[in-house]
Image: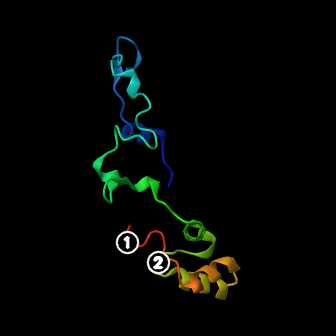
Amino acid sequence: MATTSKNMKGFYRQKKNKAAGGITKSKSSKSTKNPSLKHAATFGSDITQSPALISHGGSLDLKDDLDEQEQVLRLFDMNMAYGPCLGITRLARWERAQRLGLSPPKEIENLLKGGKVNLECLFDGRV
């Protein structure tokens, strides 16, 4: 696994400008873009939203209207302390974490057994 500097120089080959004696950078021209579009790509702007972000009748995917319960369950999905969530329901993941002694929140179990929430994880069907 010993790597000499000679091998690295061959791997990262750089072109040098002999007149200047160093590595050259390309000159960038000043942009003449419209200054009013400077912050157009911010959240909530529809000026530069690509079609991939717009679905469900024109509503943005970034603006999902989630209730408090779904937000809590999504935080549970993203918390890797309880193991991976792909290919398993939220309730099965909670039960697995309980069996392994990871002490998952009791609130999550109550939400999942209440039956009024989505049992699939946040990443189900997206990955």
The location of residue 6, given as percent across then percent down, is: 43, 38
Q: Seen from this angle, which residue lies furthest top?
A: 19
Regarding residue 25, the answer to whether it shows in the image is no
Quarter where residue 107 is shown = bottom right
Residue situated in front as seen by the camera: 82 or 1: 82
The quadrant of the rendering that contains the C terminus is bottom left
The location of residue 15, given as percent across then percent down, is: 34, 26
Q: Residue at the spot x=46%, y=59% of the render? A: 64
Q: How is the image coloured?
A: rainbow
Residue situated in front as seen by the camera: 2 or 120: 120
Give the labeled residue for mark 2. 120
Given the image, on which type of amino acid does mark 1 rest? Gly
What's the CA distance linking mark 1 and mark 2?
Answer: 9 Å
Q: Is residue 34 above or below residue 67?
A: above
Q: Secondary structure at mark 2?
A: loop
Q: Residue at the spot x=38%, y=28% of the render? A: 37
Q: Secondary structure at mark 1?
A: loop
Mark sitting earlier along the chain (1/2) = 2
Q: How many marks?
A: 2
Q: Is residue 82 above or below residue 32?
A: below
Regarding residue 30, the answer to whether it shows in the image is yes
Residue situated in front as seen by the camera: 11 or 78: 78
Given the image, on which type of amino acid does mark 2 rest? Glu
Quarter where residue 94 is shown = bottom right
10 Å crowding of disc 2: few (<14), some (14-19), many (20+): some
10 Å crowding of disc 1: few (<14), some (14-19), many (20+): few
Quarter where residue 45 is shown = top left
Disc number for residue 125 = 1
The location of residue 119, given as percent across then percent down, is: 49, 80
CB contact under 8 Å: marks 1 and 2: yes
Q: Is residue 84 left or right of residue 124?
A: right
Q: Is residue 55 above or below residue 3?
A: below
